[in-house]
Amino acid sequence: MNNKQRWMGGVVLLGGGVLLAALLLKGKEEIHQNQNPTPETAQVEQQGQGAGKMSSLTVDVETEKRLLEEQRRTREKSVAEQEARAAEFLAMQQQAEADAARKAAEEYAALNAHRTAQQSSDNIPPELIEDEKAKQKRAAEDKLAAQKKLDQQTAQQKSDHAKQDQARLAAEKKAVEDKRKAEAQKEAERKAQADANKKAAEKKAADEKHKLEEKRKAEEKLKAEEKRKVEAKKKAEADKARDLLENGDKQWMVQVALAANEANADAVAAKLRAKGYKVTKSPTSKGIRIMVGPSKDRDTADNTRKKINSDASLNMKSAWVIDWVPLDKR
């Protein structure tokens, strides 16, 4: 009967060990699945990371912490479920051991009662009692060792998870900081380039403005010079006409036209001068008189008139001879 009890105890321990190993293996697979997300989860995380890279400089670190906290709670929940299953297994093992011990005790009691009926209790072999106590002690020690080993594994898993979380958080924090520094450097370079472009554009605009100002001054100077020459020429002609009117004797002139303004008078005078005639302009109350001459006699002046009237290029057919008397002698 003693060998039968040992055999039953060994079967119970072996079955419990197999069940414990299966539960531990299943727990490791679940932990591995929690640590290694599915391709769909990895794709979502990669898409989240891609979207984070396209976001602005300010990264929501609190959101990252919240995600890590949710992952940590998920792992803790998985560990808690494993611990619950292990506790359930231990309870089942304890129940099985208790059932085996109860059954063994019942069988022992039945055997003892049967032997008591045949002989006195003093004849019961003491090794039976000692074997039962050793068995119970060994079962308690095995149970305590299994519980201790399970506690050590659970503590090691928690420690590993905590280290992984810390390492992941540190890596993500470093990645965020590196990204922030890179974007800050990129922004500084962009700003420096924009400032350089702005300064170059301002310098170019200043140079163009300076060139335009110099060109405007040169044009104004040229116009002033031309105006001065025209005024000097007009003054010389006026002085000449005045001298002719005031100091000369009676002279014969060929009056070509009577211009309404100075511009028309200048145009007519320019045509005559181009033909080699000596032109004199004299302002009157009715306009500006354009004359060719003077001639010393009327015949010479009349010949000049005929020449002017017959010149088709001049188109001045209304010229006539006048006697020119200075104003002070009229």
Image (cartoon, rainbow, N blue to C red):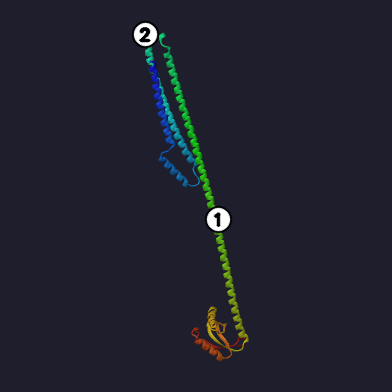
Q: Position of residue 112 (x, y in %)?
A: 38, 12
Q: Is residue 250 above or below residue 140?
A: below
Q: Is residue 175 above or below residue 139?
A: below
Q: Position of residue 256 (x, y in %)?
A: 53, 85
Residue at 55 percent of width and 61 percent of height:
204
Q: Residue at x 59, y 71 (%)?
A: 221
Report whether 189 appears left or right of 22.
right
Residue 229 image offset from top left, x and y in percent: 59, 76
> Mark 2 Cα within 10 Å, few/some/many (few <14, many 20+)?
few
Nearer-N-terminus badge (1/2): 2
Foreground pick, 78 / 320 = 78
Q: Residue furthest right?
A: 247
Q: Amino acid at mark 1?
A: Ala
Q: Which residue is mark 1?
A: 196
Q: Quadrant of residue 321?
A: bottom right
The residue lying toward the viewer, choosing from 1 and 235, is: 1
Position of the C terminus, as image quadrant, is bottom right
Mark 2: amino acid: Gln
Q: Which mark is residue 215?
A: none
Regarding residue 153, the answer to whether it shows in the image is yes
Residue that numbered label 2 is attached to: 118
- Is 233 left or right of 79, judged from the image as shown? right
